[in-house]
Image: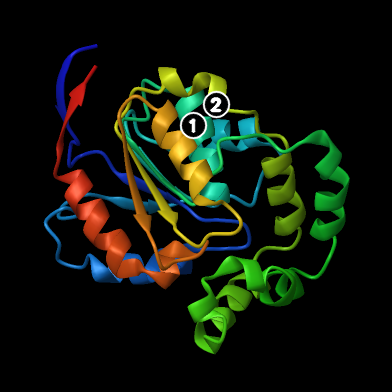
Amino acid sequence: MTGSLRIDPKWPLLLLPGTLCDARVFGPWLDAMAGDPALAGRRVLHADISGCNSAPALAAQLLDAMPAHFIPLGFSLGAIVALELALMAPDRVAAMVLVAANGRDVPAGDHAARRVAAASDPVTLVGNTLWPRSVAPSRQNDDQLRKLIADMARTAPPGALAMQTEVALTRSDKRPWLAGMAMPTLVLGGGLDMIAPVALQRELADGLPNATLRIAADAGHFLPLERPDFCARVLAEWLATAYALN
């Protein structure tokens, strides 16, 4: 495929949150883009990723509800789902945005421990157990940010953590398929992310034919909440760019 492509403003953004997150994880990012021409007239849709217990089933359910062409924008588990969508329907995923993503599968030896964690209290899991690894060191004492992340977990539907854990565990290793995902892709990462380190973001960007990699050096895993200004600026620039297709 040769030529160039502009990201059509008619293609809606499908926002895919992370584990135990909801639309609030994208709130500051969208607020920072209020009035930006990059979003003018573009529909922004919010996905529910709590209703299926496998990655392929969730992707199929989302595809049934989406228009012919759309742009998945996924954070963490949402980025894993975005990759699943791109694998299943490359003709419909017109472009994608992967934030704090991981293109690998979960080793079978880790499944049992992940399921044990999924049986724990969701608020304790994100507010205490995972908190030290979730944000940059400079945000460790940010009680407002910690409360928001815990509140999203608190209001998640019953059983959401168990189902979302199964989505994570049932994903396939996407690395062998990246070269065939030719749609323009923006890969965003936090330079201090301990959950999805920079190396994983570079791996995706190197494997995808039309990828743009941007790293916020001072952010951790919750990049959309830690640096919404960075996310807004980079997404606006990317949406306005013409891409050469190889």
Residue that badge 1 annotates: 85
Mark 1, residues whose alpha carbon is within 10 Å: few (<14), some, or many (≥20)?
Answer: many
Q: Quadrant of residue 159?
A: bottom right
Quadrant of the drawing holding the N terminus: top left
Q: Is residue 149 left or right of residue 185?
A: right
What type is the residue that disc 1 sits on? Leu
Residue 28 rendering spot, x and y as whole percentages: 35, 72
Under tag 1, what secondary structure? helix
177 relative to 112, above or below: above
Q: Is residue 190 left or right of residue 128?
A: left
Between discs 1 and 2, the one toward the N terminus: 1
175 relative to 120, above or below: above
Q: Cα distance, mark 1 to mark 2?
A: 14 Å
Question: Can residue 160 be seen from the camera position used here?
Answer: yes
Q: Quadrant of residue 105?
A: top right
What type is the residue that disc 2 sits on? Arg
Q: Nearer the viewer, residue 162 or 199?
A: 199
Residue that badge 2 annotates: 175
